[in-house]
Image (cartoon, rainbow, N blue to C red):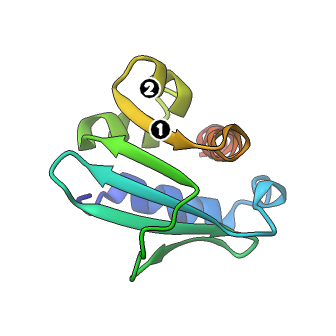
């Protein structure tokens, strides 16, 4: 995944937004982003916030696959995570509760910009 300033701003906002902190899990959730170009990045969502994992070992709770164009729609709040998945613009794998938690966090972040 390319470095994306919209994504970086969203992460900074997530880590400082007191409204989303109650949704952060006590046990970490690992989120893997897989671009169509083969680039793979893993992020850790926990009580402390979200941070990039430098050595993602392939263990993930949520895996999001797609291209940068569709991720931008997600980061900018144009479409929700499950909408993009239902439209087959991205592919989301993981437990429903984890996906719903991530979508809720992203939605709250969008409305508090």
The residue where tag 1 is placed is 92
Left or right position of 29 against 97: left
User: Which of the pair 81/7 is nearer the observer?
Assistant: 81
User: Residue 113: horizontal and vertical position, in percent?
Assistant: 59, 46
Residue hosting label 2: 84
Residue 28 image label = none
Q: Residue, x 50% and y 55% (percent of image)? A: 10
* Residue at 15%, 51% in the rendered image: 37
Could you tell whether 94 is left or right of 46 in the image?
A: left
Give how far apart the Cα atoms at labels 2 and 1 are.
9 Å
Residue 18 image offset from top left, x and y in percent: 78, 61
What is the tally of numbered marks visible in this picture? 2
Neighbours of disc 1 within 10 Å: few (<14), some (14-19), many (20+): many
- Quadrant of residue 112 within the rendered picture: top right
Q: Is residue 5 left or right of residue 62?
A: left
Asked whether the residues under the numbered discs 2 and 1 touch, taking CB atoms below 8 Å apart as contact, a structural biologist would say yes
Residue neighbourhood size for the residue with mark 2, other residues' Cα within 10 Å, grouped as few (<14), some (14–19), many (≥20): some
Residue at point 84%, 58% (across, down): 22
Front in this rendered view, residue 47 or 90: 90
> Dot 2 lies on which element?
helix
């Amino acid at each position: 995944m390319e470095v994306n300033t919209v994504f970086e701003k969203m992460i900074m906002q997530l880590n400082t937004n007191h409204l989303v902190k109650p949704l952060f899990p006590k046990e970490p959730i690992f989120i893997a982003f897989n671009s169509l170009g083969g680039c793979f990045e893993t992020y850790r969502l926990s009580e402390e916030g979200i941070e990039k994992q430098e050595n993602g070992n392939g263990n993930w709770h949520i895996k999001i696959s797609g291209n940068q164009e569709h991720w931008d729609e997600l980061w900018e709040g144009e479409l929700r995570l499950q909408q993009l998945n239902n439209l087959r613009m991205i592919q989301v794998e993981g437990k429903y509760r984890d996906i719903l938690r991530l979508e809720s966090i992203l939605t709250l972040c969008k409305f508090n910009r």
